[in-house]
Image (cartoon, rainbow, N blue to C red):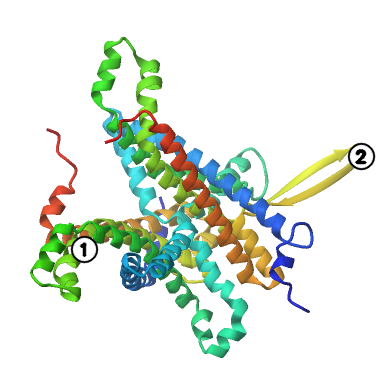
Amino acid sequence: MDFTFLGESFLRLIGGVPLTLQLAFSSIALGLCLAILLALMMQSWFRPLGWLADGFVFVFRGTPLLVQIFLIYYGLGQFRPALDEMGIWWFFRSPYYCALLALTLNTAAYGAEIVRGGLQSVPAGQIEAARAFGMSGLTLYRRIVAPIALRQALPAYGNEVILMIKATSLVSTITLMEVTGLAHKLISETFRSFEVFFVAGAIYLAINFAVTRLIELAEHRIAPDLAQANRPAEVH
Amino acid sequence: MQAKSFLELMQWGPQGWLDEMMFATGLTLAVAIVGFLFGLLFGTLAAIAKLSGSRLAKRLADAYTTVFRGVPDLLVIYLFYFGGSAVVTAIGQFFGAQGFIGLPGFLIGTLAIGIVSGAYQSEVIRGAYLAVPPGEVEAARAFGMSGRALLWRIIGPQVLRYGLPGMGNIWQLVLKESALVAVVGLSVYLYEVRLGDLVLIYETRFSDLLRQAHVAAGSTRQPFVFYITAVAFYLVLTTASTWCFRRAETWATRGMRRV
C-alpha cells in the first residue's frame, strides 16, 4: 500500500468533515422539532391534522432521499419566476439550503414515527396519576410525558442519527463537496478507488463510532435502568 | 413555445414520456430485485460465517457488516463503479486487450446494492436462525432427521417465518437505495447485428426511474413534473411491496398460535 497517497487522501477528505457534520446535525436538530410537531399532530383530536402528518410521513418514508433532493433542487427550478416574485428564490437557488431542507424533511418523517412510538410508550397510569395530582397541559408534558418518551425513544433516535450522517453523502450529487463528494473527485482524478474508499470509509466509521458512544453515554445518563436492559441478554 | 400540459407530457408513445417512465420503473424494480438477491446470497454466507464455530470466519463476517452498514451506500457504488472497472481493465490488459473496459452499470449497481443489503440481511438471518427453538431441532433429531431434512423441514421454514418482517424492511431500503444507480447510470449497450455483409450497430440506453426523470426534465424544461411523477411511481412501488410482504407474513405465520 502507498502510505503517502493514503496520507494525502486523508488530508483532502478530512476537509469535507465539517460540512458533513454541519449538514447532519443541523438537519437532525431542525428535523427533530418538526418530528415532535408531526407526532403531536398525529395524536391530535382534530383528525385532519393527523391525516396531514400521516400523508407527510408516508410520502417522505416511501420515496428515496435522492429523489427528494432532486425534486427540491432541480424540480422547484421550474417555478423560478413565482419563487422570485415571492422573494425566496435565493433559498432554492442554493444547493446547501436545498440539501438542508431535503435532509430535514426526510429525517422529520422517520423521526415522527420514533417520537410517536416514544409517546405511546408512556403508561396511561402515569398520565392518570399526574392528572389526579392536578397537572395538566404543558406541565404534564414537561414533567411526565416528555421524560418517559425521551428515554424510550433515544436508542431508536441514535440509529436515525447514524443514518443521517450516511445520508449526507447524497448531497454530493448537487455539487456540495462533503466527504463523499471529495472522495468522488479524488477517484476521478487518480482512479485509485480502493485507497480512496479505504480512507473515506475510515472517516465515516470513525464519526459513527464517536456518535454511537456519545448516544450510549446519553442513554446511561438519562436512563441507567433502560440502558442496562437494552444490553444483549446474558445466557442463563 | 407553449409549454405542454401535464397530460400531454405524460402520454403513451413517442409524443409523451409515460412509456419511458413505466419502462424505467420496471428497470428500477429489476435493479432492486437482483440487488436484493445478491444481498440474500452475501447475507446468507455472512450469517453462516457468524454462526459457524470458526473464530476467523466470525471476525471477517463481523467486519463486513460493520464496514458496509457504517459507510454511505453512494461511496460503495463509487468503489464498485471505478474499482470494478479498474480490476476488469487490468485483467483485460493482462490478456492483451487495450484501453479502458467499462463494466455494465446494471451489474455494478446490483452488486454494490447487494453487498450493502447483504450486511443488513446477515443480521436478520442470524437473528431468525437463533429464534428457532432448540427443542424443535432436538425433537427432529430424535425423530431421526438430519442434515438436509432438518434444514428443509424444520429450520428453513422457521427462519423464513421469523426473518420475514426484517427482510421486508430491508427490501424497502433496497428499493429506495436502487435510486442511487442513477448517479452512475445504467450505461449504454451496443449491439452488433450482422446480416450477411451488412453490419448494423444498435445502441440502447437504459435508465432507471430517477435518471429517466432527470433526462426528461432536462429535455422538456419541466423538472418538477417529472420528479413528482418519479415520486408517485416510487410510492406505488413501496406501497405495493408493503402489501405483498404483509400477505407473505400472513401466509408464513398461518400455522402459528396467536396469543
Q: Quadrant of residue A10?
A: bottom left
Q: Outermost residue, top direction? A: B144
Q: Is residue B174 left or right of residue B70?
A: right
Question: Of the numbered discs in the image, which one, if any, rests on residue A60?
Answer: none
Location of residue A71 by image quarter: bottom right
Residue lying at 49% horizontally and 54% vertically, measured from the top left: B176
Q: Chain letter of disc 1?
A: A
Nearest the eye: B41 or A113: A113
Image quarter (top left, top right, bottom left or bottom right) of the C terminus of chain B: top left
Which secondary structure, mark 1?
A: helix
Looking at the picture, which amino acid does disc 1 mark?
Leu
- Decide if residue B50 is on the left or right side of residue A140: right
Q: Are marks 1 and 2 on the same chain?
A: no
Q: Find the residue positioned furthest to the right.
A: B197
Q: Where is B99 relative to A89, above or below?
A: above
Q: Residue at x 78, y 57 (%)?
A: B13
**Residue B89 position (above or below residue B212):** above
- Residue at 46% x, 52% y: name it: B76
State yes or no: discs 1 and 2 in contact (Cβ < 8 Å): no
Numbered badge on residue B197: 2
Q: Position of residue B115 (x, y in %)?
A: 45, 44
Which residue is label 1 attached to? A150
Residue B185, by quadrant, is bottom right
Q: CA distance from mark 1 to mark 2?
A: 75 Å
Residue B15 in sight: yes
Q: How many marks?
A: 2
Quadrant assignment for the N terminus of chain B: bottom right
